[in-house]
Image (tube, rainbow, N blue to C red):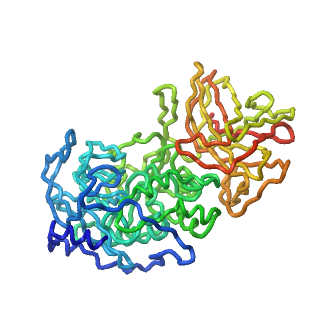
Amino acid sequence: MREKLRRYFVHLSAISAICVLFTGIGYAADNPLPAKYPDEWGVIFGQAMELDPSDFPTEGHNAFTGFDPSRTVYKKGTVFYEGGTAIPCDIIYDRDVTVTMRDGVKIYIDIFRPAGATEKLPAIVCWDPYGKGTPRQPLSEIPSGEGISGLAMFEGPDPGYYCNHGYAIINVDKRGANMSEGNVHYWGMLEAGDGYDLIEWLAKQDWSNGKVGMAGHSWPGISQWFIAAAQPPHLAAIAPWSAHFSDQYRGDVCVGGIPTTAFNKNVTDGLRTTNLVERPYAMVEKYPLMHPYWEDKIAKIENINIPVYSFCGYSDDLEGARELMRLGHSETWLYIGQRGATNDIDLLRFFDRYLKGTENGWETTPKVRLRVMDPASIDQFNRPETGWPLPQTVYRQLFLDSSTGALSTQPVTEPSNARYSTKEGKAAFKITFEEDTELTGYMKLLLWVEADGADDMDVFVAIQKGDAQGNFYRATNGQQRVSLRALDPEKSTSYMPVPSFRKRDLLTKGEIVPVEIAIQPLGMVWYAGEQLLLTVSGRSMGRFPVPTINKGDHIIHTGPQYPSYLQVPVIP
């Protein structure tokens, strides 16, 4: 298939001398990053969406505008789509430039840089598998201070903006994406090795000042955790935005030990490639417990030793952000809020400081900035903080009372239990706040549970905010398989349980056990008279369907012997 496509495209453009200059000769890395998975892992790959020369999508996740090694100069004022922003400077566009990885695999990149630059340029890399084809109707989730030109990759920085400020933007078809050789890999040290090689290759180009940064949302953000942890010598700063997780098992395909693969399957099967795509959703069936394959997909955040500006939504990877804050990295900044809450003007100051050496006062930026939401109105509290989780947090326990369906600030004195059918039932508990209360940070739920008719349980939790008019809004959620309740003592904290997922501990008939359930962090205010509603169910209450092992009934025990409680992060 690849050779047919290569022959099909060869008439489109002769490979010019300029492209020869950019052709990689392979980076002889002096670090031990691997170029392939160990054979004994038996990693599963499969075909996704084949490239079809008669059907080139020019927009969306998998934009592909053909294979055409060439150079174009876009003139200032060019508009690429109806209603688009005109580019503010002349831009040199080197398309389908070859870079050779350590194992000989060739990937293709696009390089955008300002024409007529009189100084060496820093580079900003966007790394993902979705397709670098441009120009196209923009779907970028990074807002631009001067509009979006149509030259950005999906979820990447806009060359129309950054070239005008003296940067080269590098759009990458990572290994396996579109015409790049090899199979598409999902993060881990293989992707880190490829990123390492590209960064070191970029630093050697005659237009480069030797400093490389990375930017982007989602996959381009997640990749940064792994690539930066590999410590490429010329990677100078990263900006992982909306990087949903730094641990693929716990954060993506097996949340709470429950196979949660619908989103991963949707992304994997929708990638466009001439080769194969790694299938983590299938690897969950092969390795349902923690395994070296999954350990490879936990970013070694403790190895990151360069400036980091991470933007997270409350549902994004605040565990990775917590690790950065815990390490006390003096050049780490965190912004927490809704997607789109920050913009390129802010990010430009960060990169100017660490990729250009501009003394612009960025260091005085508060280490943590956050927005506290109120879903019932447009109110948002935007404020600086000194750490994450917030140092002033007071963790309070709200005790479940099965007899009344209440959450109580005082321990429950009478024993009772709540039973629900795993097919359609649920248990609900409420508290009405007597004064304005901000909850910002990590919640957890400790339940004493029993399975009637089964030896295991999948438990799903939802937190909602109810306003004074009786309207309820989703706040956050969590889930946990009870047989995998054993915690990892090194990763867990008093506010965030982290299961080890190394062995199953099935239930016996009539056995009552405690299980701690991590709940995604939130930042929200409840006004006096408003309610917090906790719902526990045997069915997923999220966006995607989650098949479960549940059957029979679940029983939640409360009272003095079984003090089930919801722990909440109260900000005084």
The N terminus lies in quadrant = bottom left
Q: Is residue 252 left or right of residue 176?
A: right
The C terminus lies in quadrant = top right
Q: Is residue 330 left or right of residue 422?
A: left
What's the residue at 67%, 23% (across, down)? 434
Q: Is 201 located above or below residue 534 in the figure?
A: below
What's the residue at 34%, 43% (across, down)? 143
Tell me where residue 84 appears, x and y as whole percent: 22, 42
What's the residue at 44%, 54% (across, down)? 267
Q: Is residue 128 visible?
A: no
Q: Is residue 34 visible?
A: yes
Q: Is residue 132 left or right of residue 224?
A: left
Q: Is 175 located above or below residue 513 in the figure?
A: below
Tell me where residue 535 appears, x and y as whole percent: 67, 35
Question: Which is nearer the eye, 528 or 118?
Answer: 528
Q: Is residue 245 left or right of residue 348?
A: right
What's the residue at 87%, 32% (across, down)? 414
Q: Is 178 located above or below residue 154 in the figure?
A: below
Tell me where residue 3 appears, x and y as whole percent: 27, 73
Residue that sits furthest to the top in the current view: 469
Circle count: 0
Q: Quadrant of residue 569?
A: top right
Tell me where residue 384 appears, x and y as whole percent: 49, 40
Question: Which is nearer the eye, 220 or 37?
Answer: 37
Q: Is 211 located above or below residue 165 in the figure?
A: below
